[in-house]
Image (spheres, rainbow, N blue to C red):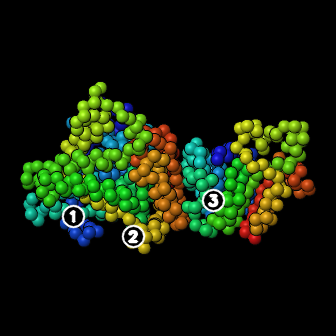
Amino acid sequence: MMPSATPASLSARPDFVAIAKWIRPEAKVLDLGCGDGSLLRHLQEARGVTGYGMEIDDANVLACVKSGVNVLQYDLESGLSGFEDGSFDYVILSQTLQAIRHTERIVNEMLRVGREGIVTFPNFGYWRPRLQVFAGNMPVSKALPYEWYDTPNIHLFTIDDFENFCAGHGIRILERNVMVDGRPVNWMPNLRGSLAVYRFDRA
Amino acid sequence: MPPEGSVGVVNAKLARFEDPIALKSGARLDAYELAYETYGTLNAARSNAVLVCHALNASHHVAGVYADDPENIGWWDNLIGPGKPLDTNRFFVVGVNNIGGCHGSTGPASINPATGRQWGADFPVVTVEDWVEAQSRLATFLGIVRFAAIMGGSLGAMQAMQWAISQPQRVAHSIVIAAAPKLSAQNIAFNEVARQAITTDPDFHGGNYYSQGVVPKRGLRIARMIGHITYLSDDAMAEKFGRERRGVELKFNFDVEFQIESYLRYQADKFAERFDANTYLRITKALDYFDPAAASGGHLSAALASAEARFLVVSFTSDWRFSPARSHEIVKALLDNRLSVSYAEIDAPHGHDAFLMEDPRYHKLIRAYFDNIAREVSAS
C-alpha cells in the first residue's frame, strides 16, 4: 500500500481534530498508516495517550522517530497478527481505508485488536466529485488529489456505502462527524460533506 | 591518520574487580578484569552515558584507532564519533570486552589464580546474563548509575535486551539491532558445526592447547567461514563475488577456483590470527543459551514485564540469520507490556552484517533516535 499523504500541520487536518475530541485521556491507541505521526503526537500531547503508529514508508518512519512518536514499520496489508485481541482502546485508520486492498479484513482486524475503530475517508458522494464524474472525468480535488492512473485510492466509496458496509458486517456506528472545509455538515451529509470521520465498534 | 569524524586515537583501559561474580552455570569467578574504552565526556549529571555491547567477533574497541596500530579501526566507527549518529560530542560512550573474551578481559587465556596456569578448558561457560552483571559493575566503577542508552547489534542486541530485563532502573533506552529473542534450531546448528570444527581439531587438546604451544587454527578457520556465510545474504554474495573465478582456466583440483573461496580463506586466516578458539566456543554457547523467556515459561512478554526502558528495534530485510520476523517477536512482547517501542525494518541487501554497514536510512534513524535522547539528557 501507499504511504498516506499526510499534511504536516494539524490545522490542515480537521479529521485529526475530530478524532482527538473522541479519544479518552490515557487511552492506548494504534494509528494505522500514521504518516509522519502528527496525529499521534497531538494525541500524546493533548490526551496523554500511549500510542503506536504503523507505517510502511521509510521517510515517514524517520519523521515519526524524529518527533518522538512510537512507530512500527509494518505493512498493514499483511495484517495485525502481531497484536493480541483487545490490545488497544482505539485503532485509527485515517485517510487510508480507500487505499487498502482487503477492506473487510482490515476493518475486522481493527475491531479484533481494538475495542473501537475510528476511520476517516474522503466522501466520494460529495457533490463536487459527483459533478466531475457527471461531467465525464474521474474527480481530482484537494481531498482526492490523484489522477485515475496514479491514485493509491483503489476503493472509493461514499458515506452511504460505508454505513451499508457497517450494517452488513455487524459493525455499530458510535459517532459520525461529516465535514466540508473543516466545518460540520449535518444536513444531507452524503452530498454536502467532503470528509467523514466515524467511530465504531462490534455490534 | 584516523578517518574523518573519528574519535581519533583511543586507549584501552583495564578495570579489575575483586568482588566475586556468580555465573549462571553455577561457577564463580573470584576476581576478573574487564578491558574497556570510553569516548566523549561523562557530563556532571552522569546522564549521557551510552553502553555499546559487542557481538560474536568484536571487542571493546568500538571506535577510533590505536596510536601504535592505526589500521585497527573500531568495529562500529562508522556509527560512533564526533558528529556521527551516536555523537561522542554529546554522549559518553563505553565499549567493553566481555568476560570469556580474548581482547583483554578475563577469559580462557587468562591465568587461573587457583593453578597459576592459563584457564583453558577450565574457564567457565558464560552467558549473556553474566555479561550484563559484569558490565553493570563496570558502570558502577565508572560512576554511571543509569545509561541514557544501551545499544548492540546481534549478540550485542541481546545484551541490550537483557539489561532492560535484569537492570531495568539502569537503562533509559534499549537499542536492539538485528536481534532475536532466542536462537532457532538452525542458528544453534550453525554454532554447533563451528564448535565441532574447533573441538575436533587435533591441536585443540581438549581446550588446553596453550600449554602445548599450538592453536587449533584449522577448526577456528572453519568456524569463522561458517559464521561468515551466515552473516551475508545470498544477494550480497552474488553481488560481491558471483561465480567470479581467480584464474581464467578451470583447474579441476581443490585449490581456490572461485573468488568466494579465496575471500573465505582470507577472512578465516585473518580471524584465526587474532581470535581465541576457547573464546569462540564460549561466545557461541552464550548465544545458544540466551533465552530470556525460558524463565517465564517461554513467554517473552512475561520476561519483559520488568523492563522500563524505551526501545528502538531495527531489523534488516535480507538478514536470514536473525530475520525481521525474529524482531517482530521482540516488538510484540514489548507491545504486550505497553512499553515504548519503535521498530524499523531497513530494506538493506547485506544480510545480518547490515547492522555494521553505513546504510543512510539506517544511520539517519539511529541519529534521529539519539538526537531525541540528547534532548532528554540536556533537559533533565
Which residue is painted at 15% across and 58% down in the image?
Answer: B207
Which residue is painted at 53% across and 59% down in the image?
Answer: B340
- In the rendered view of the protein, which quadrant contains the N terminus of chain B? top left
When the figure is inspected, residue B318 is found, relative to residue A82, above or below; the finding is above
Q: Earlier in the sequence, mark 1 or mark 2?
A: 1
Is disc 3 on the same chain as disc 1?
no
Q: List the residue tagged with mark 3.
A: A30
Residue A33 in sight from this viewpoint = yes
**Tag 1, which chain?**
B
Q: Is residue B56 left or right of residue B175?
A: left
Closer to us: mark 1 or mark 2? 2
Label 1 close to label 2 by CB (< 8 Å)? no
Q: List the residue tagged with mark 2.
A: B294
**Label 1, label 3: how far apart the Cα atoms are:** 46 Å
Task: Point out residue A111 in the picture as x, y percentages from the top left corner.
Answer: 68, 65
Task: Tell which residue pokes out farthest to the bottom in this image.
Answer: B297
Residue A48 in sight from this viewpoint = no
Figure disc tally: 3
When the figure is inspected, residue B295 is found, relative to residue A160, above or below; the finding is below
Task: Point out residue A62 in the picture as x, y percentages from the top left corner.
Answer: 56, 45
**Label 2, label 3: how far apart the Cα atoms are:** 29 Å
Q: List the residue tagged with mark 1.
A: B124
